[in-house]
Image (cartoon, grey):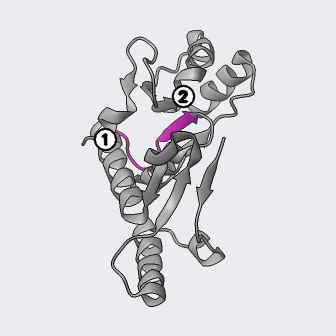
């Protein structure tokens, strides 16, 4: 359950544009080491060696997800739900939503399906990103509601009709 964000300070939290944050870190990095090799921004320890991401990779991932969300019809103010454990996908969604002006709604995976279903009905996400291991909880929460978001599974087989997250990153 590990996600490590490296070298993120209070000034970054005030930035509204991920490009500004990334540019600031590139300048800081180049001043420190004088090299053009990127530092890892995030290490998603659950993914092992493939879970190391540079700032440039995070920016590309966020841009691709934002483009996919926009292509799916999301606009400023629309909501994107996420039901997942900590992972790089949470950061992808956070930055992609910021780029679109959409609202990321993180749902607590510890909730009972009825509680989760009520939150989903109240927040009306247009898209629901979810971990495959939480797919049954997601399905049960959506079963009785009027809300029918696009479903996107982060890994695994996913629920029937769900879109693999990897496809969203291919845009």
User: Which numbered dot is residue 142?
Assistant: none
Assign a secondary structure to mark 1. Answer: helix
Q: Residue at x 41, y 85 (%)?
A: 30
**Location of the C terminus (image quadrant):** top left
Pinpoint residue 77: horizontal percent, then vertical percent.
47, 47
Relative to 49, say whether 109 is above or below.
above
Q: Say above or below: 162 vs 107.
A: above
Q: Quadrant of residue 166?
A: top left
For the point 60% across and 9% down, the residue is 144
Highlighted magenta segment, given as a residue range: 72-82
- The Cα–Cα distance between marks 2 and 1, rounded to whole angstroms, is 18 Å
Is residue 20 among what the camera can see?
Answer: yes
Determine if the magenta segment contains residue 63.
no
**Percent from the top left, x then y, of residue 45?**
58, 46
Residue 80 lies in the magenta-colored region: yes
- Residue 131 is labelled as 2
Residue 68, labelled with which disc? Answer: 1
| Earlier sequence position, callout 2 versus callout 1 | 1
Which quadrant holds the N terminus?
top right
User: Does residue 156 lie above or below 30 as drawn?
Assistant: above
């Amino acid at each position: 359950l590990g996600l490590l964000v490296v070298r993120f300070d209070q000034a970054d939290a005030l930035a509204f544009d991920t490009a500004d944050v990334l540019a600031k870190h590139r300048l800081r990095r180049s001043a420190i080491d004088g090299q053009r090799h990127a530092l890892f921004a995030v290490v998603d320890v659950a993914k092992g060696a493939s879970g190391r991401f540079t700032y440039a990779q995070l920016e590309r991932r966020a841009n691709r997800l934002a483009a996919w969300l926009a292509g799916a019809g999301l606009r400023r103010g629309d909501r994107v739900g996420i039901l997942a454990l900590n992972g790089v996908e949470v950061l992808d969604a956070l930055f992609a939503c910021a780029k679109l002006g959409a609202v990321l709604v993180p749902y607590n995976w510890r909730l009972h399906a009825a509680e989760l279903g009520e939150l989903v009905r109240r927040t009306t996400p247009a898209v629901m990103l979810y971990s495959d291991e939480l797919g049954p909880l997601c399905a049960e929460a959506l079963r009785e509601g009027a809300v029918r978001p696009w479903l996107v599974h982060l890994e695994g087989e996913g629920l029937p009709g769900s879109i693999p997250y990897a496809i969203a990153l291919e845009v």
